[in-house]
Each structure stands twice: as structure tokens, then as C-alpha cells.
């Protein structure tokens, strides 16, 4: 799927701004993870070399524990490497619908466009707007988020 990255930038928040705007107690969970996590230096060095060649778009919700863990780490990666990371936030489940997983609005319609089933979903795009790969909920077993991103970008 080829997307218009400029349009995505208009509809998303930079990852640090997304975390800043979270309400309590959710924001504190994201910030605690960010403070406690130690990034893998080797992976960061590789990611720094690819800055400007990829854009990360994540779908997140304040209530999601995997989001608190992985979006916080993605924010650290972005800060340490300059890798552009954007967030579609405010995803809400739709318990009243048998056909829709997410309540739209307030969830962005892109949750359906990108066929988001689980949170967080972290999508890596190349600079042309082509989807390279995605991480759903957590990195693969035995990988940190930064290691998984390196593997995706290398391929």
C-alpha cells in the first residue's frame, strides 16, 4: 500500500507530543517505561544511519498496556536516532458493533484503512510511502523493538 506521507503527517502527532498529551494515569505509565528502558546501542547506531529513509506510523491507545511498553520505547528510539515516528492515538474499541472493532469516531478512520486489528501496530514506511513491514503488539520473541526495526529496515 502506497500512502501520502504528507497527509499522514497532518493527521498524526509526533510521538513525543502524543505522550505529552496523554491523560493521567496513562501518561505516567508511558513515562515510567521510557525512564526505565535501556536501548541497545548497536541497533541505535544502525538506525541512525537510515534516518530520513523511513517513517514509522503507530496506532496506539492510552489504555493499552503493550502501547505503554512499546510506544514509549519507540519514542526513545526516535529521540536517540532522529527516526521520524508519528502516532494515530485515541483508538477506542466499539463494544456495540458486531462488524467494527474500533469506534470511529473517536478512533481515526485510518484504523480501518490500515486494517488495524491489535494495538499497538507499528508500521514502517519507506520515504516514498510504501509499507515495508509492521510490528503488531510486540517485537518477535527474542528481539527488542529497536532490534526488530533494524531487521525490518535492513531487509
Image: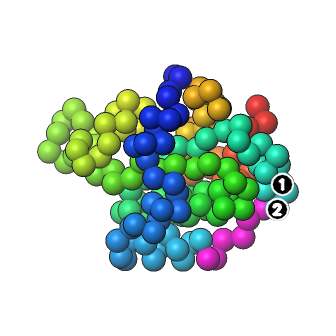
In the depicted structure, whether residue 113 falls above or below residue 62: above
> Which residue is at a point 36% across and 63% down the rendered structure image?
63
Q: Position of residue 50 (x, y in %)?
A: 77, 42
Give the left or right position of residue 1, taking residue 115 as reference. right
Magenta stretch holds residue 147: no
Q: Which residue is mark 2?
A: 41
On-image quarter of the C terminus: top right
Please report the residue visible at 28 percent of the width from the left and 51 percent of the height from the top: 92
Percent coordinates x, y for residue 111 in the rendering: 37, 38
Residue 11 in view in this figure: yes
Q: Do residues under tags 2 and 1 come within 8 Å of each other at their CB atoms?
A: yes
The boundaries of the magenta stretch are 35-40
The kind of secondary structure element at disc 1 is helix
Apparent side of residue 103 relative to residue 27 in the rendered image (left or right): left
Q: Is residue 44 above or below residue 151?
A: below
Give the number of the disc on residue 45. 1
Q: Nearer the viewer, residue 77 or 145?
A: 77
Which is more toward the observer, 55 or 116?
Answer: 55
Q: CA distance from mark 2 to mark 1?
A: 6 Å
Note whether residue 120 is visible.
Answer: no
Residue 80 appears at what percent x and percent y? 72, 62
Q: Is residue 22 left or right of residue 50?
A: left
Q: Nearer the viewer, residue 52 or 134?
A: 52
Q: In the image, what residue occupies the spot 28% across and 40% down?
A: 101
Q: Secondary structure at mark 2?
A: helix
Q: Is residue 44 left or right of residue 122?
A: right
Position in image of residue 8 (x %, y %):
46, 38
**Residue for point 18% across, 36% down:** 98
Residues packed near mark 2 inside 10 Å, few (<14), some (14 to 19) or many (20 plus): few
For residue 36, the mark is none
Dominant SS of magenta comes to: loop
User: Crowdedness of circle 1 by 10 Å Cα count: few (<14), some, many (20+)?
Assistant: few
Amino acid at each position: 500500500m502506497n500512502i501520502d506521507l504528507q497527509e499522514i503527517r497532518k493527521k498524526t502527532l509526533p510521538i513525543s507530543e502524543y505522550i505529552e498529551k496523554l491523560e493521567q494515569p496513562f501518561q505516567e505509565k508511558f513515562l515510567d517505561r521510557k525512564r526505565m528502558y535501556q536501548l541497545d546501542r548497536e541497533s541505535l547506531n544502525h538506525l541512525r544511519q537510515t534516518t530520513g529513509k523511513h517513517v514509522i506510523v503507530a496506532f496506539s491507545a492510552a489504555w493499552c498496556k503493550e502501547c505503554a511498553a512499546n510506544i514509549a520505547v519507540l519514542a526513545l528510539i526516535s529521540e536517540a536516532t532522529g527516526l521520524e515516528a508519528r502516532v494515530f492515538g485515541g483508538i477506542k474499541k466499539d463494544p456495540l458493533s458486531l462488524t467494527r472493532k474500533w469506534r470511529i469516531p473517536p478512533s481515526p478512520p485510518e484504523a480501518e484503512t490500515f486494517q488495524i486489528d491489535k494495538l499497538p501496530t507499528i508500521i514502517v514506511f519507506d520515504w516514498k510511502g510504501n509499507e515495508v513491514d509492521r510490528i503488531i503488539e510486540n517485537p518477535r520473541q527474542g528481539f527488542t523493538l529497536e532490534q526488530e526495526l533494524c531487521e525490518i529496515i535492513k531487509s
